[in-house]
Amino acid sequence: MPDREELEMAAGHAGADLFGVADIARFDELAPEKHPRSIFPETRSVVVLGRRIPRGALRGVEEGTNFSNYRLYGCEWLDNQFTSLVTFRVCEFIEDAGWEACPLPNLPPEVPPMGVAVAEGRPAPNVMLDLDDAAVRAGVGEIGYCGLLLTPQFGTRQRIQVILTDADIEPTPMLDGPIDPRTPQFRDVCPFGAFVGETELSVCGKKMLVAEIDYGRCRTCKSGAMPNRMHPAGRPDRIAAHCGRTCLDLLEKEGRVANRFHVPLRKREAWLIRPELDLYDL
């Protein structure tokens, strides 16, 4: 079976900025509709890989003058080409060692079934895993108060994919302390009132206080949020939204992100396009 250190080194050579492994037991609490073994019944390990979003890809959105740069370098090209190539090459490494490797892109887990079950007891296709959830189980990050995956290396700035394998790989430890301080600044970060409450999320025993989010409001946000490019049922992309950029700026200023910069992300007062008040009954 692949040695975890060798696998992590191979992932790094392939271009991965993030790496983690969860054994399949960490997914025991999930329903079949969200379980890795519904896709690959012999899965023993779940490998999570990620590539960073360059902070400069957010610069045009932060200034309110260029949104396409983030869409390409922070989203479409980064996910479909750069991160996918990393995933493919790590699959090759695993399969060269004689173990099967099933690559999975980050498709929205909110997508409803699009077919009928092929046999009794099997979920209907397509089974969509929550890769942010998998990243928490693999020790790559946590779910922040704003509902985004946060990592200690890059905060909100990453795209991740997953490999399911029948190789028995030593798991990486889950993160201990929180990245997100859950301060009042974070709780008031949405200017449109989409954070309508809060709840405690538990993933494999790790507890995280997160906001209850009205994604209907997020879908109409004009301050950097983008519709889910995979499926209309998916949550909007909020990494470049006002909430995501504010969260990243606060994490960096509090020294909670390892990738440091000489200047802050937010150098000027944040711009906002506010919704009509009667749209949300505020």
Image (cartoon, helix red, strand yellow):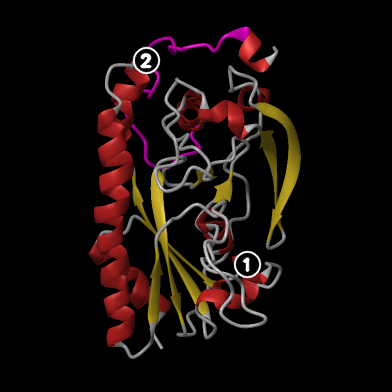
Q: Which residue is more in the foreground, 176 or 137?
A: 137
Residue 173, which numbered label? none
What is the magenta segment's predominant secondary structure?
loop
Q: Residue at x 68, y 40 (%)?
A: 210
Label 2 vs label 1, nearer the camera: 1
Question: Which residue: 43% across, 11% down?
Answer: 271
Q: Residue 61, located in which quarter of the rendered image?
A: top left
How far from the left and from the top, in percent, is residue 220? 51, 24
Q: Which residues are magenta?
A: 255-277
**Cα separation between marks 2 and 1:** 44 Å
* Residue, disc 2: 267
Q: Residues within 10 Å of mark 1 (few under 14, many from 20)?
A: some
Task: Name the secondary structure under disc 1.
Answer: helix
Image position of 36 with respect to 195: above or below: below
Q: Where is residue 21 drawn, in percent x and y?
A: 49, 69
Residue 259 lies within the magenta run: yes
**Residue 51 appears in view:** yes
